[in-house]
């Protein structure tokens, strides 16, 4: 005797699919709640977004009083089987082995009794999960269980060549197991796993060939053969559903399902179109006079395919008509409720995921009733950047593909976080894709091109434009990827060892390398490249537009190997990020370009506006040192932050003064530095002195600022007369404008020279605004 619950490759494949379908989307434009800690009222604490794939809540049975399910755990531990009553009660079902359609048999469907095997004794408890009461049933020797419907257990026996020769209907009468043997239809042989659907009184079985199926009366043992009218003579891919009024079956690959009246299974058949969902495999169910369709997701064919939350749940009138979508996404498992309708799991997205009952309303149309919500699971975040108040997170699974998500954060006044927006896709894994915010609303990262074996710099702007550049035309290992050193506006610095390349993403003719350096010390501030010639204490500021070089000397007798710059502050370090295991006493400090003074620091760190942030990896602490007065204060602890390998878990906003960090659970924190910021200033400008007026072309000046501005206006004048006033659009800490050489009414201005004036105020209201001026000569083109 045996109660057969062993796993097969089919089970493994199905479970793999089930586990792969578990989502939580992050939608562009969706505001993420932000909460402030009581002890730090200016801080933002932003919980991790939901995972795109919902939490899997697998169904195993449905009865008139509840359903059996097993919900994926958040810690990866084995989930328990639980019976959820329609009244909201829930209890654990110990010992259930959890078979579902398409696996080894069809167990526990169609009633409120569940089969629970007792060890290998051949005894099965028919357990009522609502009360805990049970009835023992003994499976005879030589029989193997293939289905269970309430108080009825179905088994098979084999002939001498291990072909199924009989079905057996087992019941308990007066404490004794009864056995009703059922022979196959004439000329047929039962499939190895014959039971595909049923309830307490009826089961649908399949034969070894798919041209015929059988409807079995569990009370009498009468087997009625039904012509299946399937496309191919295969039984293994036939599925079925039983409702109080209908029986439906469907063969994988067909465009229609067949439906008969339950009280006349051999009678007239209705062909019902099954809606397609790409390559996904339909799964059929019934609700009243409607055919339900969910979908088993097709196996992905490409590398790193997009995550999917499931196919839709649809309902099609049996009498004919167009399908309606009940749920945007659903798990494939559908279980019939004996009294009518079905139980399914799905929703609009992971935040809306729930176990739902499909019923029919007063008008006969299908309606949904939520039985139990399935809470979303946090997404995996592996990288953070902060620039001009824009928080960037690299998110592995909050969207169909790994992506960079941005949101505007405000720390002045009441802390707030704006809506989330996806900038671009991100590379998988930790080695590549750690983001940098370039200060103009763009995000810069590195990807590896497997085809060319090159590292590629990628710049994605706030409007979705994506630009790429190859800094070194030679093969790079696919584990490099941490060579992105700095970014500011249109420029980025990339390299390793003692090599650095400066890329201009807006160079004439396309992105290009505009500087190559043989030093690891290179930093950007606007259009100025800071580097060193290798001489101890000497640093240089090189204007990338004009080529002009300005030399400075800092209090360093060693070779400087790292530079960072924010306005008046230049951080230098003779150890640098390229020295592993170097002497920690090697000099480092900050040079003040305004006073010419050198400021000693107690610890190394990432430069901000008047401060450095140090991650003490030994102590697991993030600390801030304020030096804006010219003297470094004692470091103060911002938070405990464990070390993580391979990805960036904290950043400093050098264009605004905030500090951000990311916990391993995906919670992001943003706090103000508490250090006064420098006055608003221009760090780079592109204001062409000449403009040729042609159709569709405009004069488009742009300015990169030290921090975000607001209320920016560009005034065009002829001598003292104002001809046009334009808004200058902000993008991070950058401003852009466009003038087509016309007055407000569209009248072209005469060719000639005009003056312009740009005014803007600091977005945070701190300090004075800026006023810039210049001239542009307008001429007419062909």
Image (cartoon, rainbow, N blue to C red):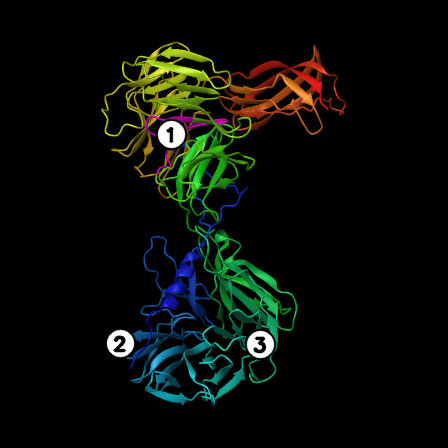
**Which comes before the other along the chain, label 2 or label 1?**
2
From mark 1 to mark 3, how far is it between C-alphas?
66 Å
Q: Quadrant of the N terminus?
A: bottom left
Range of residues picked out in magenta? 480-501
Q: Residue at x 48, y 54 (%)?
A: 308
Front residue of 199 and 254: 254
Residue placed under numbered mark 1 in the picture? 495
Q: Is residue 762 magenta?
A: no
Give percent across and percent down for residue 587. 27, 18
From mark 2 to mark 1, how far is it between C-alphas?
64 Å
Q: Residue at x 51, y 82 (%)?
A: 212
Q: Nearer the viewer, mark 2 or mark 1?
A: 1
In contact (CB < 8 Å): disc 2 and disc 1: no
Say if 423 sits above or below 367 in the image: above
Residue placed under numbered mark 2 in the picture? 120
Answer yes or no: is residue 600 visible: yes
**Which comes before the other along the chain, label 1 or label 3?**
3
Residue placed under numbered mark 3 in the picture? 259
Q: Residue at x 55, y 28 (%)?
A: 509
């Amino acid at each position: 005797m045996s109660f057969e619950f062993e796993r097969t490759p089919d089970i493994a494949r199905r479970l793999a699919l089930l586990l792969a379908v578990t989502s939580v989307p992050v939608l562009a434009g969706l505001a993420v709640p932000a909460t402030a800690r009581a002890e730090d009222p200016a801080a933002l604490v932003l919980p991790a977004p939901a995972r795109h794939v919902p939490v899997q809540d697998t169904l195993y049975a449905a009865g008139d009083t509840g359903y059996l399910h097993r919900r994926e755990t958040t810690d990866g531990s084995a989930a328990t089987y639980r019976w959820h009553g329609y009244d909201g009660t829930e209890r654990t079902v110990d010992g259930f082995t959890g078979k579902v359609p398409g696996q080894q048999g069809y167990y526990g469907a169609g009633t409120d009794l569940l089969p629970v095997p007792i060890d290998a004794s051949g005894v099965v408890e028919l357990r009522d999960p609502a009360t805990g009461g049970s009835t023992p049933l003994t499976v005879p020797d030589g029989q193997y269980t293939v289905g269970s419907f309430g108080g009825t257990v179905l088994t098979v026996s084999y002939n001498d060549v291990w072909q199924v020769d009989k079905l057996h209907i087992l019941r308990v009468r007066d404490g004794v197991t009864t056995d009703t043997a059922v022979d196959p239809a004439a000329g047929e042989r039962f499939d190895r796993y014959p039971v595909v659907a049923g309830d307490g009184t009826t089961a649908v079985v399949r034969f070894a060939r798919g041209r015929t199926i059988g409807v079995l009366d569990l009370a009498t043992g009468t087997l009625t053969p039904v012509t299946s009218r399937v496309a191919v003579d295969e039984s293994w891919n036939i599925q079925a559903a039983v409702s109080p009024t209908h029986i439906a079956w469907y063969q994988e690959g067909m465009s229609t399902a067949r439906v008969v009246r339950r009280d006349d299974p051999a009678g007239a058949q209705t062909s019902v179109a099954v809606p397609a969902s790409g390559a996904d495999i339909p799964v059929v169910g019934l609700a009243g006079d409607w055919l339900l369709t969910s979908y088993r997701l097709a196996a992905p064919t490409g590398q790193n395919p997009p995550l999917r939350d499931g196919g839709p749940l649809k309902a099609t009138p049996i009498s004919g008509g167009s399908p309606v979508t009940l749920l945007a996404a659903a798990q494939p498992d559908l279980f019939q409720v004996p009294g009518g309708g079905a139980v399914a799991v799905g929703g609009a997205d992971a935040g809306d995921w729930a176990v739902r009952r499909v019923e029919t309303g007063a008008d006969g149309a299908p309606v949904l009733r939520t039985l139990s919500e399935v809470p979303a699971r946090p997404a995996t975040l592996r990288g953070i950047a902060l620039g001009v108040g824009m928080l960037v997170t690299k998110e592995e699974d909050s969207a169909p593909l790994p992506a960079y998500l941005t949101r505007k954060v405000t720390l002045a006044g009441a802390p707030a976080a704006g809506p989330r927006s996806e900038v671009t896709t991100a590379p998988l894994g930790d080695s590549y894709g750690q983001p940098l915010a370039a200060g103009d609303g763009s995000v810069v990262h590195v990807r590896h091109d497997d085809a060319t074996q090159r590292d590629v710099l990628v710049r994605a702007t706030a409007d979705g434009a994506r630009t790429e550049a190859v800094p070194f035309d030679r093969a790079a290992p696919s584990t490099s990827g941490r060579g992105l050193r700095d970014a500011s506006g249109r420029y980025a610095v990339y390299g390793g060892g003692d090599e650095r390349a400066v890329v201009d993403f807006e160079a004439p003719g396309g992105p290009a390398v505009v500087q190559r350096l043989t030093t690891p010390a290179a930093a950007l501030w606007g259009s100025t490249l800071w580097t060193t010639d290798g001489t101890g204490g000497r640093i240089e500021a090189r204007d990338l537009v004009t080529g002009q070089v300005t030399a400075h000397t800092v209090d360093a007798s060693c070779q400087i190997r790292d530079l960072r710059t924010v306005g008046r502050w230049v951080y230098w370090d003779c150890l640098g990020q390229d020295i592993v295991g170097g002497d920690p006493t090697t000099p480092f400090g900050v040079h003040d370009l305004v006073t010419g003074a050198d400021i000693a620091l107690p610890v190394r760190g990432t430069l901000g506006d008047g401060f450095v942030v140090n991650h003490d990896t030994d102590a697991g602490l993030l600390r801030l040192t304020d030096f804006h007065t010219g003297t470094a204060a004692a470091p103060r602890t911002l938070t405990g932050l464990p070390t993580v390998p391979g990805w960036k878990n904290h950043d400093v906003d050098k264009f605004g003064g905030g500090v951000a960090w990311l916990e391993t659970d995906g919670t992001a924190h943003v706090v103000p530095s508490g250090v006064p910021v420098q006055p608003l200033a221009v760090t780079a400008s592109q204001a062409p002195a000449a403009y040729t007026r042609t159709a569709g072309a405009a004069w488009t000046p742009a300015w990169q600022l030290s921090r975000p501005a607001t209320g920016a206006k560009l005034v065009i004048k002829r001598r003292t007369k104002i001809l046009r006033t334009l808004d200058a659009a902000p993008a991070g800490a950058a401003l852009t404008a466009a003038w087509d050489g016309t007055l407000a009414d569209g009248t072209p201005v005469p060719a000639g020279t005009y003056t312009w004036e740009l005014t803007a105020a600091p977005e945070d209201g701190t300090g004075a605004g800026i006023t810039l001026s210049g001239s542009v000569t307008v001429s007419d083109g062909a």
